[in-house]
Amino acid sequence: MLDILTANDWSARLGQVFQTHFGSEKQINLHLTAVTPLGAESGNRRQAYSLLFSGPLTPLLPQAIYPLRNASMGEQGIFLVPLGPADQTMRYEAIFT
């Protein structure tokens, strides 16, 4: 499903909570805070875009694929990269090409 989602699909979910787990039991809530188009569309390929999530400062999620669950989107395995703290939250980015 990730291969057909576009920036518009995610933009409709700005501000929503996505849940994941760290370790065996620790649930983490991440908020979708930004959807940014990257470059221009290329032929039949979708436009690249980035997603920015914010979550708690601890625990820090290391760079990895995480199962993110959302009420309207179900579960998606998304590769998250920690960007660092901002305003008492930790920021994470996912890029789709």
Image (tube, rainbow, N blue to C red):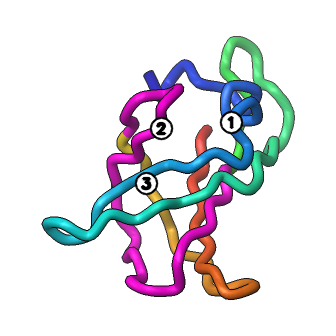
Mark toward the viewer: 2 or 3: 2
Q: Which residue is mark 3?
A: 79
Q: What residue type is disc 2 on?
A: Asn
Image location of residue 41, percent across then percent down: 80, 26
Q: Which residue is mark 2?
A: 70
* Residue at screen point 36% across, 55% down: 20
* Residue at screen point 53% across, 60% down: 30
At numbered mark 3, what does the secondary structure look like: helix, strand or loop? strand
Farthest residue in the top direction?
44
Disc 2 from disc 1: Cα separation: 9 Å
Image location of residue 79, percent across then percent down: 43, 54
Q: What residue type is disc 1 on?
A: Arg
Which quarter of the rendering shows the N terminus? top left
The quarter of the picture where residue 90 lies is bottom right
* Nearer-N-terminus badge (2/1): 1
Q: How dense is the environment of label 1, judged by Cα within 10 Å: few (below 14), some, or many (20 and up)? A: some
At numbered mark 2, what does the secondary structure look like: helix, strand or loop? strand
* Nearer-N-terminus badge (3/1): 1
Q: Left or right of 94: which side holds 64?
A: left
Which mark is drawn over residue 13?
A: 1
* Residue at screen point 81% across, 42% down: 37
Vertical relation: 82 (above or below) 71: below
* Residue at screen point 44% across, 86% down: 58
User: Observer-nearest residue: 62 or 15?
Assistant: 15
Q: Left or right of 84: which side holds 73?
A: left
